[in-house]
């Protein structure tokens, strides 16, 4: 028994048996019919018999599923910045979080297309409560972030998680993906939770904090969707927060959100890999001696990279102009694009509910606002 057994993905020698165990599950059949609509079930069942590693499952099955999703629900995926990375090294990709499933899946597709080793990716155990999803996550090299724990249990869980991530990066040369915060960003403001960095730092041993984070080779990753297919689903929680009310999720809400995120229309998508955090950390080390202030400064560096490299789409500029009743960015979109966005707003939000309308627009407009703030500082 390993102390990582409760959170780790499958080892390769466990893959075939696990895959055979869910091969006839109705959800697997649905997924395969979606991915390979022109293939007979017996064909992909035979293919499963010869899949013996996670890499084979990801490249032969999951990558094809993601390509099919892009074909059906987007106008294409573009990416930049990856040519500056070394294919022989591991990286800790810390990204803004737009979609539960696709954020990490799109990154892995880009890495596969560019001949990088694909990542091991963090996922909350609350999202894989169904047995099928739990097995599928472990087959896709996801490791579990345990939720709903007591304070004492959370401390122990964070220590194990920190050690596991460090082991992947330093001992196994395996890149890792993590969101910059717990849960998807609901309001378009991409901010790194300092607690994520505190958790990572629990594996430091005797190394200085800056040297430790340099060794992780952090790459801030900016993920930009032209349309957020779950935009309206985020509204109830945003409104509850604005009223300082406790938001309680409905049964199967996470699962339904996952489906909407995967199948809903996104139009264009762009991923940008920022520069590896290296020299900037040396600068921070000389400026901050207090650990908490240093972690806060590292979080801000990650935020600046993600915000700066976020691809702004016409929808972002349209939302800004509608929200602020201006035509400041009218040269960044066409009349037709504005009409389409206004139609989406009209269909998804009751026009009488001005608070909801403002929150919806702010979700798309805030990336513009944040880039403007960044430009004014630098």
Image: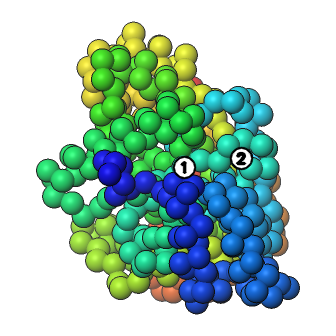
SS class of the residue under badge 2?
A: helix
Residue 121 visible in the current orientation: yes
| x and y percentages locating residue 324 in the rendered image | 56, 59
* Residue with the mark numbered 1: 120
Residue 21: x and y in percent read 53, 78
Which of 238 and 269 lies nearest the eye of the viewer? 269
| Residue 338 visible in the snapshot | no
Dot 2 alpha-carbon crowd within 10 angstroms: few under 14, some 14 to 19, many 20 or more: some
Q: Of 70 and 126, which appears nearest the observer?
A: 126
> Residue sitting at 79 percent across and 82 percent down?
43
Q: Residues within 10 Å of mark 1 (few under 14, many from 20)?
A: many
Residue identified by numbered label 2: 111
Residue closest to the far top: 286
Q: Quadrant of the C terminus?
A: top right
Tag 1, which secondary structure?
strand
| Residue 159 numbered mark, or none | none
Q: Nearer the viewer, mark 2 or mark 1?
A: 1
Compared with residue 35, is residue 40 higher up or lower down, i.e. above or below? below
Q: Quadrant of residue 374?
A: top right
Residue 248 placement: quadrant: bottom left
């Amino acid at each position: 028994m390993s102390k990582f057994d409760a959170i780790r993905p499958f080892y390769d020698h466990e893959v075939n048996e696990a895959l055979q165990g869910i091969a006839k599950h109705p959800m697997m059949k649905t997924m395969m019919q979606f991915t390979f609509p022109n293939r007979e079930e017996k064909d992909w069942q035979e293919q499963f018999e010869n899949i013996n590693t996670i890499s084979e499952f990801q490249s032969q099955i999951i990558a094809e599923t993601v390509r099919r999703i892009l074909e059906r629900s987007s106008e294409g995926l573009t990416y930049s910045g990856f040519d500056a990375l070394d294919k022989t090294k591991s990286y800790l990709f810390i990204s803004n979080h737009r979609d539960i499933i696709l954020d990490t899946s799109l990154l892995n597709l880009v890495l596969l297309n560019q001949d990088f080793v694909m990542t091991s990716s963090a996922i909350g155990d609350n999202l894989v409560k169904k047995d099928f999803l739990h097995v599928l996550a472990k087959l896709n090299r996801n490791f579990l972030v345990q939720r709903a724990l007591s304070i004492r249990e959370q401390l122990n869980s964070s220590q194990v998680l920190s050690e596991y991530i460090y082991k992947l990066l330093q001992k196994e040369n395996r890149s890792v993906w993590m969101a910059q915060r717990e849960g998807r960003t609901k309001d378009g403001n991409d901010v790194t939770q300092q607690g994520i960095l505190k958790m990572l730092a629990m594996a430091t041993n005797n190394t200085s904090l800056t040297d430790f984070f340099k060794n992780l080779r952090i790459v801030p990753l900016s993920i930009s969707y032209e349309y957020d297919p779950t935009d309206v689903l985020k509204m109830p929680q945003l409104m509850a927060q604005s009223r300082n009310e406790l938001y309680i999720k409905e049964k199967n809400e996470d699962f339904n959100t996952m489906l909407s995120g995967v199948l809903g229309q996104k139009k264009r998508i762009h991923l940008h890999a920022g520069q590896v955090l290296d020299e900037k950390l040396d600068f921070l080390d000389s400026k901050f001696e207090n650990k908490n202030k240093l972690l806060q400064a590292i979080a801000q560096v990650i935020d600046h990279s993600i915000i700066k490299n976020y691809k702004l789409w016409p929808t972002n500029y349209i939302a800004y102009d509608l929200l602020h009743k201006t035509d400041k960015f009218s040269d960044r979109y066409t009349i037709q694009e504005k009409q389409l966005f206004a139609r989406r707003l009209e269909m998804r939000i009751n026009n009488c509910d001005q608070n909801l309308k403002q929150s919806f627009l702010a979700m798309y407009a805030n990336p513009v606002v944040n880039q403007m703030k960044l430009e004014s500082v630098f």
